[in-house]
Amino acid sequence: MRFAMIHEADGSAVRQQCSLCGDAIYVGEDYYQVNGQVFCESCLEDYARAYFAPFLCAGGQREWK
């Protein structure tokens, strides 16, 4: 699969854009691709917290129905 690259004025190439913060992810930088969305490393924790929020157990207890 090939991705279009956007070249910035300083010559750096943008590979992706973070789906959460919108920051550029440059060629050579690590990122996460989850369910068709792209996340920079600094946003992964925020994404995971929001994704798993419905499963949060108050006081360590969860009542399953």
Image: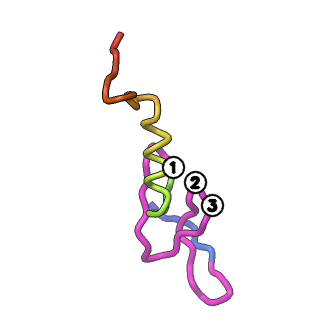
How crowded is the residue under tag 3: few (<14 C-alpha within 10 Å), some, or many (20+)?
A: few
Amino acid identity at mark 2: Ser
Quarter placement of the C terminus: top left
In this rendering, is residue 63 above or below 61?
Answer: above
**Which image quadrant for residue 55?**
top left
How crowded is the residue under tag 1: few (<14 C-alpha within 10 Å), some, or many (20+)?
A: few
Give the residue displayed 60% in from the left and 66% down from the top: 23
Which of marks 2 and 1 precedes in the sequence? 2
Give the residue displayed 44% in from the left and 63% down from the top: 41
Give the residue displayed 60% in from the left and 88% down from the top: 11
Disc 1/disc 3 C-alpha distance (Å): 12 Å
Pointer 2: what residue?
19
Left or right placement of residue 5 versus residue 32 in this view:
right
| Of residues 15 and 42, the one drawn nearer to the viewer in this rendering | 42
Pointer 3: what residue?
22
Amino acid identity at mark 3: Gly
Pointer 1: what residue?
37
Give the residue displayed 39% in from the left and 28% down from the top: 58
| Picture coordinates of residue 9, whole percent (x, y) | 68, 87
| Of residues 45 and 56, the one drawn nearer to the viewer in this rendering | 56
Element type where label 1 sits in the image: strand
Q: Are marks 1 and 2 in contact (CB under 8 Å)?
A: yes
Q: Are marks 2 and 3 in contact (CB under 8 Å)?
A: no
Q: Residue furthest top?
A: 65
| Picture coordinates of residue 22, whole percent (x, y) | 63, 60
Magenta segment boundaries in residue numbering? 7-36
| Picture coordinates of residue 47, whole percent (x, y) | 48, 48
Left or right placement of residue 60 versus residue 13 in this view:
left
In this rendering, is residue 54 above or below 49?
Answer: above
